[in-house]
Image (tube, rainbow, N blue to C red):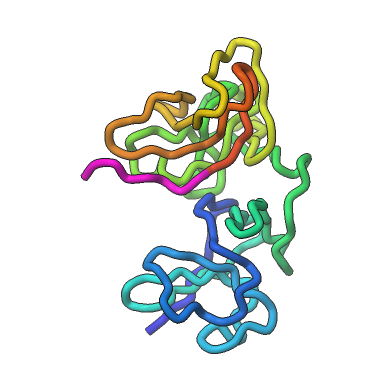
Amino acid sequence: MPTTVELTSLGFAVAVVSRSTAAPPLSPTSGQKYIIPLGATGAWASKTNQVAHYLLTGWQYYQPVRGAYTLVLDEDTNVQYDGTEWRALSNEARRPAYIASEAISALRVVRASAVGHVVYARHPEDESKYPLGITINAASANGLVNVATAGELSDSSWSWTPGAPVLLGANGTLTQTAPSTYTVQVAAALTATTIVVRINPPIITAA
């Protein structure tokens, strides 16, 4: 039977297909996720704001906690749950501050820890497949670090190939060289020194 579990992390970076689809799709793909809107019908009735996750056995439901966020693919918009509804994030809100569970450098990819703090997204660990964003500043353990979850970032030391994806590398580094096991695009290079942060779902390239 479908179950509802609490989404306990401060954030989750797995994208959802839509937040406006009112009826469960007739032929969903396993792994797809939707934010259930007000007025949903069928199996989604009375589950407003929950995240519906389709698996081969049926729908699984997640109750978001305040602060949970995700990317809505059909809007290309990051949204965050404020405890009442999902709201689109402004540019300023896309650089929220988190507590660092370890010493973290600037311009590195991080993920949410089990307690909602941030740690490096360490490729190829499984948890690194779902990064939170890219750090704006450095922070010591238990310090505050701002994380860009969308929008532009620039650094004069970068030398990217414009138009090419920017990927998660080892220990949260940024790279344009695809790893051998799976790739996670975290940004796209706008110019040699500017990227646009955009967290995409992982692409598995090897068993």
Between 26 and 154, the residue placed more toward the observer is 26
Residue 172 position within the rendered picture, expressed as x and y whole percent measured from the top left:
46, 29
Residue 13 position within the rendered picture, expressed as x and y whole percent measured from the top left:
53, 50
Is residue 187 shown above or below 174?
below
| Residue 138 forms part of the magenta stretch | no
Q: Residue at x 49, y 42 (%)?
A: 131
Asked which quadrant contains residue 170, the reply is: top left
Q: Magenta segment range?
A: 200-207
* Left or right side of 124 for 146: right
Between 36 and 142, the residue placed more toward the observer is 36
* Left or right side of 156 for 29: left
Is residue 66 shown above or below 49?
above
Is residue 119 shown above or below 37?
above
From the image, which quarter does the N terminus lie in? bottom left
Asked which quadrant contains residue 73, the reply is: bottom right
Classified by dominant secondary structure, the portion drawn in magenta counts as loop
Q: Residue at x 50, y 45 (%)?
A: 200
Between 35 and 165, the residue placed more toward the observer is 165
Question: In this view, which residue lies farthest toward the bottom?
Answer: 42
